[in-house]
Image (cartoon, coloured by chain):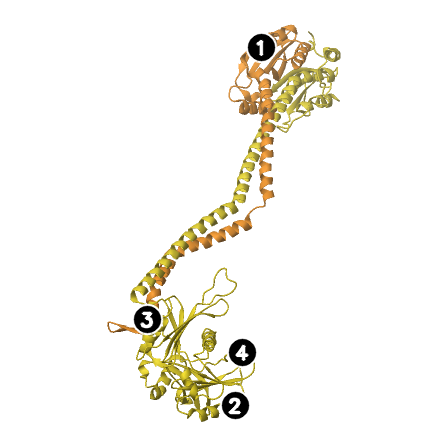
């Protein structure tokens, strides 16, 4: 025990004086600098544990990767199959939408009527598509949606004069020819004072 | 006690024993690994009239100053057996017991209790009294000795009276007794029971013969192995029987060896006055506090960086732990996107395929529809029926015919069978009598062929019951029959070319 300026300092006080600064530093550090990092550590620990528990098996990851590879291969294959389909459809529709083909088809039709003894009376273009049969209407709608506006056939009305068998032969040849013209409606009537019959045929060309 | 890294056992600190008697100063150095052994001994005559601290310093300086633990055996110290009432010392231990005994010892030693450094060991008791063997000296002397040794790097471990060592000198397997004659005191040591030796102080100079009865009375029985040891040769004259003297080198060495062994043992049974720990200087205390604070700061900084490092490690571990899940999610997203694209492409392909088939099928049927209709009419029309008009609008076709009878059996059925694959359904005819003949005939019959909407988009094959193409020969054969029948009824035949 000692005395400093009237204050008695015990042995315990001396020990405390030695260790208090160090304790103060440790306490201040612990309070100010370790709370947040330790909380982050705990949170990270928990996250790591959770992630480890929830982690998928390696085989599942590999399976998913392989699925992607297989799908990519299938997609490539499907795209490869799509190309010829488009080309084929393009070929199918080109004869209906290509102006040169349509002009040639018109000439071939004229020759067809003449060849089968049918006299052409009048040929006009129709704008009213409503006269189409439902199946053709569907085809027209789908063609319009698929091929775009202006790339589908035009409806013509052709008035002819001739016999029943003439028309039958003409339609028979037309059904077997490559002419891009489809008869969508047919009318037959008698013509007073004239041989044969009057025919009105609507062609989708 | 310190230990060497490469030693085979614990290494003991070097120990120096200083023996101070009125005539001699002796320094004995001990060293050893497992047990202390006497290495060197110095001896000189003690100067007369000097104080104990001076004598101790002189004895220590007989050899070279070095860092050793020092024990001082000074025959000038006061040693005695105190008998005190048990109540006075009940519950007292350590410093409190020493303080209490200091007051009791003052009467004999003359040392002021407030300047007393005292060591006591129990020495039995009887009834209500308790006895203590005490050794006492001036606290000032003790502090002075401590300081003088400290200056010379040595550390004072204890001060004791050299008399009454509770050990046999030399080998002794059975009981032993020893009487020690010192200049102003006689001590008895009884080792009848070697495990628990005891001692007794007779506070009478050997020169006076009064000690013998007390000694005999205390020992009780005389053992044949009782020896007398004298501090120096001048005291032999007061001894009886076989006597050894510390003047003899072998006796001195053996005796010092036993003292060293006793004092450095785990727990000495001798009253050894131990110096109070030296208070630490303020500067040193401040330096120590600063060092501790710095150390604490360093530990905090290290801990801070450790936490940072640990955080980084955990972040890495988290990234590693989450990697499979992220990879799985990435692969799944990619696969799902590919799946969607694949389905879109397949859907588009299917749509194109259906359109292609629908296009082909529809155009094929439309191409052949009217040719087939005309052919069927030519084949199915009976002789008494003439088809006069055909009208078609928006897929609905009307046939108008003239018949001699109101019914044309089989006509509609045949036509239906031929044209149904092309999406036509024939309705029963509307009939109207023209009332030209007596029976009301001929009749005008109107058939409606309504278009049946086939399932759009369904790919259909060509009609199975329809001719693949219209045969010209069949047309001509049918036309002949139909034309003949109609010609009989109507003025102009419909089949004429």
Q: Is residue B373 above or below residue B338?
A: above
Q: Is residue B34 above or below residue A129?
A: below
Marks 2/3: CA distance? 45 Å
Q: Which chain is yellow?
A: B
Q: Are marks 2 and 3 on the same chain?
A: yes
* Residue that label 3 marks: B148
Circle 3 sits in a helix, a strand or a loop, which is it? helix
Q: Chain of mark 1?
A: A
* Residue that label 1 marks: A106
The reply to whether discs 2 and 3 touch (Cβ–Cβ < 8 Å) is no
Q: Pick the residue in front: B354 or B432.
A: B354
Circle 1 sits in a helix, a strand or a loop, which is it? helix
* Residue that label 2 marks: B222
The reply to whether discs 4 and 2 touch (Cβ–Cβ < 8 Å) is no
x, y percentage for residue B8?
52, 63
Q: Earlier in the sequence, mark 3 or mark 4?
A: 3
Q: Are marks 3 and 4 on the same chain?
A: yes
In-image side of B420 versus B67 (left or right): right
The residue carrying pointer 4 sits among few (fewer than 14), some (14 to 19) or many (20 or more) residues within 10 Å by Cα, namely few
Residue that appears at 52% across and 90% down: B222
Circle 4 sits in a helix, a strand or a loop, which is it? loop
Q: Pick the residue in front: B272 or B279.
A: B272
Q: Nearer the observer, disc 4 or disc 1?
A: 4
Q: Is residue B12 above or below residue B331?
A: below
Q: Which chain is orange?
A: A
The reply to whether discs 4 and 1 touch (Cβ–Cβ < 8 Å) is no
Q: Chain of mark 2?
A: B
């Amino acid at each position: 025990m000692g005395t400093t300026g009237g204050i008695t300092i015990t042995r315990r006080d001396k020990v405390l004086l030695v260790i208090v600064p160090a304790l103060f530093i440790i306490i201040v550090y612990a309070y100010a600098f370790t709370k947040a990092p330790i909380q982050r550590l705990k949170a990270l620990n928990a996250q790591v544990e959770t992630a480890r528990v929830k982690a998928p098996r390696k085989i599942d990851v590999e399976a998913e990767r392989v699925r992607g590879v297989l799908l990519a291969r299938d997609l490539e294959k499907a795209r490869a199959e799509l190309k010829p389909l488009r080309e084929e459809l393009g070929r199918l529709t080109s004869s209906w939408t290509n102006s040169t083909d349509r002009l040639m088809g018109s000439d071939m039709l004229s020759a067809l009527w003449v060849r089968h003894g049918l006299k052409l009376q009048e040929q006009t273009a129709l704008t009213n598509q409503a006269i189409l049969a439902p199946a053709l209407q569907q085809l027209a709608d789908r063609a319009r949606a698929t091929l775009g506006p202006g790339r589908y056939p035009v409806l013509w009305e052709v008035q002819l004069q001739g016999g029943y068998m003439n028309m039958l032969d003409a339609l028979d040849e037309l059904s077997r020819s490559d002419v891009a013209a489809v008869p969508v409606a047919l009318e037959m009537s008698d013509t007073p004072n004239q041989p044969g019959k009057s025919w009105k045929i609507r062609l989708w060309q | 006690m310190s230990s060497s890294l490469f030693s085979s056992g614990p290494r003991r600190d070097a120990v120096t024993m200083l023996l101070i008697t009125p005539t001699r100063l002796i320094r004995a150095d001990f060293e050893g690994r497992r047990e202390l052994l006497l290495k060197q001994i110095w001896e000189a005559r003690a100067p007369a009239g000097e104080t104990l601290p001076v004598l101790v310093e002189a004895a220590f300086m007989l050899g070279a100053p070095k860092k050793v633990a020092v024990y001082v055996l000074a025959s000038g110290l006061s040693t005695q057996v105190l008998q005190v009432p048990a109540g006075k010392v009940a519950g007292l231990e350590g410093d409190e017991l020493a303080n209490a005994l200091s007051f009791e010892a003052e009467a004999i030693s003359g040392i002021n209790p407030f300047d007393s450094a005292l060591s006591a060991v129990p020495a039995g008791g009887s009834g209500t009294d308790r006895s203590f063997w005490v050794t006492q000296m001036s606290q000032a002397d003790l502090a002075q000795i401590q300081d003088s040794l400290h200056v010379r790097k040595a550390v004072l471990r204890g001060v004791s009276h050299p008399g009454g060592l509770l050990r046999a000198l030399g080998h002794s397997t059975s009981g032993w007794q020893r009487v020690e004659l010192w200049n102003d005191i006689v001590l008895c040591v009884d080792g009848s029971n070697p495990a628990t030796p005891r001692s007794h102080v007779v506070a009478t100079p050997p020169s006076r013969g009064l000690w013998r009865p007390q000694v005999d009375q205390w020992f009780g029985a005389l053992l044949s192995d009782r020896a007398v040891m004298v501090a120096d040769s001048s005291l032999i004259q007061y001894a009886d029987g076989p006597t050894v003297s510390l003047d003899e080198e072998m006796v001195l060495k053996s005796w010092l060896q036993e003292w060293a062994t006793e004092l450095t043992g785990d727990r000495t049974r001798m009253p050894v006055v131990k110096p109070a720990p030296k208070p630490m200087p303020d500067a040193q205390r401040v330096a120590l506090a600063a060092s501790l604070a710095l150390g604490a700061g360093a530990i905090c900084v290290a801990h801070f960086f450790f936490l940072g490092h640990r955080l980084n490690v955990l972040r890495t571990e988290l990234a590693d732990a989450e990697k499979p899940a992220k990879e799985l999610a990435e692969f799944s997203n990619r696969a799902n996107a590919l799946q969607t694209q694949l389905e879109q492409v397949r859907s588009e392909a299917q749509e194109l395929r259906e359109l292609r088939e629908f296009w082909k099928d529809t155009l094929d049927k439309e191409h052949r529809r009217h040719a087939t209709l005309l052919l069927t009419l030519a084949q199915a029309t009976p002789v008494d029926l003439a088809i006069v008009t055909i009208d078609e609008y928006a897929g609905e076709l009307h046939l108008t015919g003239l018949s001699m009878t109101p019914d044309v059996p089989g006509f509609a059925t045949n036509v239906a069978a031929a044209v149904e694959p092309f999406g036509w359904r024939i309705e029963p005819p509307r009939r109207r009598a023209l009332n030209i003949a007596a029976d009301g005939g001929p009749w005008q019959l109107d058939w409606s062929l309504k278009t049946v909407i086939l399932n759009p988009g369904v790919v259909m094959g060509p009609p199975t019951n329809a001719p693949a193409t219209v045969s010209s020969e069949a047309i001509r054969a049918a036309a002949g029959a139909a034309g003949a029948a109609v010609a009989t009824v109507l003025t102009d035949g419909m089949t004429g070319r």
